[in-house]
Amino acid sequence: MASNGFAMLPILVLALFASSIRSEETETKEFVLTLDHSNFTDTINKHDFIVVEFYAPWCGHCKSLAPEYEKAAAELSSQSPPIFLAKIDASEESNKGIANEYKIQGFPTIKILRKGGKSVQDYNGPREAAGIVTYVKKQSGPASAEIKSADGAAEVIGEKSVVAVGVFPKLSGEEFDSFMAVAEKLRADYDFAHTLDAKLLPRGDSSVAGPVVRLFKPFDELFVDSKDFNGEALEKFVKESSIPLVTVFDKDPSNHPYVSKFFDSPATKVMMFVNFTGETAESLKSKFREVATSSKGQDLAFLVGDAESSQGALQYFGLEESQVPLIIIQTSDSKKYLKANVVVDQIESWMKDFKDGKVAAHKKSQPIPAENNEPVKVVVAESLDDMVFNSGKNVLIEFYAPWCGHCQKLAPILDEVALAFQNDPSVIVAKLDATANDIPSDTFDVKGFPTIYFRSADGKVVVYEGSRTKEDFISFIEKNKPASHGEESSTSTTIRSGEHKTEESAAKDEL
């Protein structure tokens, strides 16, 4: 993770500057509560609402967040009643049990804990102090705001917000309870309100008495109603209706929240990347929208991205600008389908072929190396079957990222391990760049770097969790490879190793 290099002195300078009119005692006071294994449970139990940051001292993002988090804590402490922000070093050995309990996989991770920790919610708000304050204040209030006037409705709904408003004849009953339960469940990512009078709302039939949920949005049809109060159906309605028919991925910051929701959607994702300033851009986008309209109800989500603004996405999918305009589809099981250099007349027919199962899956892969003579063999997606699954060998394979410091430190050690087995043709030590090649997620669970697996000649897959020394790797391989007479090895180890998040999960964890 990148670090901005904040150290203690500049943090204190910032704190002093922000509180120059306070007393000396106040200036040096820390408003963020510091927790550890000895006081975590007692502190959480005392608060009906508390925000906790799980951090690591070496994490650059954590260092960047620290002064903003402290400023927010100072302001929130003056609320009535006060709202508390806390932090815990999740990398400290004595605190790892707590980190595991809350399933912390990256830093910083912030959780909102309610009712003495009985309710746990991810913090999905901003990183800067003012945004933290606004988001936390909203989260500390009711999950759904009651609308009692037209002015109140205008304030809650606005012109650029996505808000689900429940209209009810009375604020009780099965439908109202279901609505409030969904509001509580989704409050981290969606806004909710309720009212007894539809006439107060800015759009839609004002004569309805309810119960009905009217979702307001600044795109497409501007509002949509639903009368299905089944919990799962209502949750699906809110999530699906909050995404535009075609999400736009460009430099406009107002579109970015919808892009995040698009990529969080479990639906099959259909993405077209095009040069927005190109001659054919408008005709391509128009036809793409037609296809999206005709595909409603088919569990497909559509996005059109400006190639210039979507370099990160193109890189993630292993695509080149020379392939633009293109359509790439990613299914819920991570299979990908590509139509490069697409023209207007091909969009509809290619989408039909995809739906009919006539399009072959696309695999992101580096080229198979012409020479592979180094001790640690290079594996790419296109050679994974031949070198790992069908080779009949015992393969220790490292999934790495080129930028990962731990991977770089491990490289010479794996070279030594490979040389130790150079006279044993049954053993291969290999590596695969997980940022540039697709990985079969049903076999290898790669969520951090480096992640190391061993696939034995008889097909057993074991993930390595031992120490990263030459001796430990050699011992592990000897223990897990089948005996020469075919006896099965006795290991039942199942682990996951890696200090660094993959690019995709690290992006989601960023606040």
Image: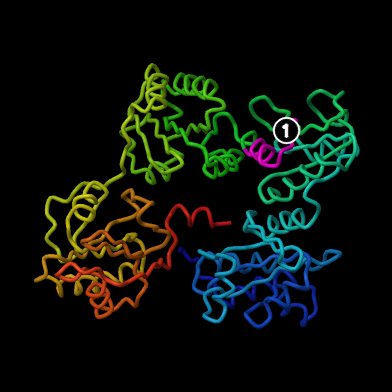
Point out the image quarter for the C terminus.
Answer: bottom right
Picture quarter containing residue 35? bottom right
What's the amino acid at mark 1? Asp
Which span of residues is magenta-colored?
227-239
Residue 237 lies in the magenta stretch: yes
Q: Is residue 9 above or below residue 327?
A: below
Characterize the magenta stretch by its predominant secondary structure. Answer: helix
Chosen colour scheme: rainbow
- Magenta stretch encompasses residue 234: yes
Q: Position of residue 87 (x, y in %)?
A: 64, 72
Residue 108, position in %: x, y? Answer: 56, 65
Q: Nearer the viewer, residue 416 or 98?
A: 98
Q: Quadrant of residue 38?
A: bottom right
434 and 474: which is toward the camera: 474
User: Up-down: is 122 above or below 334?
Assistant: below
> In the rendering, at what x and y percent does residue 436 appear?
32, 50
| The N terminus - image quarter | bottom left
Residue shown at 58% from the left, 69% from the top: 101
Badge 1 density bin: few <14, some 14–19, many ≥20, Cα 10 Å: some
Q: Residue at x 48, y 31 (%)?
A: 304
Q: Is residue 55 left or right of residue 283?
A: right
Q: Name the element at disc 1.
A: loop
User: Which picture quadrant has residue 460?
Assistant: bottom left
Q: Using the image, determine if residue 171 lies above or below residue 197.
A: below
In the rendered image, the vertical position of residue 271 relative to residue 462, given as above or below: above
Is residue 504 rendered to the left or right of residue 397?
right
| Camera-nearest residue between 360 and 414 | 360
**Residue to which mark 1 is pinned:** 228
Q: Residue at x 15, y 66 (%)?
A: 375
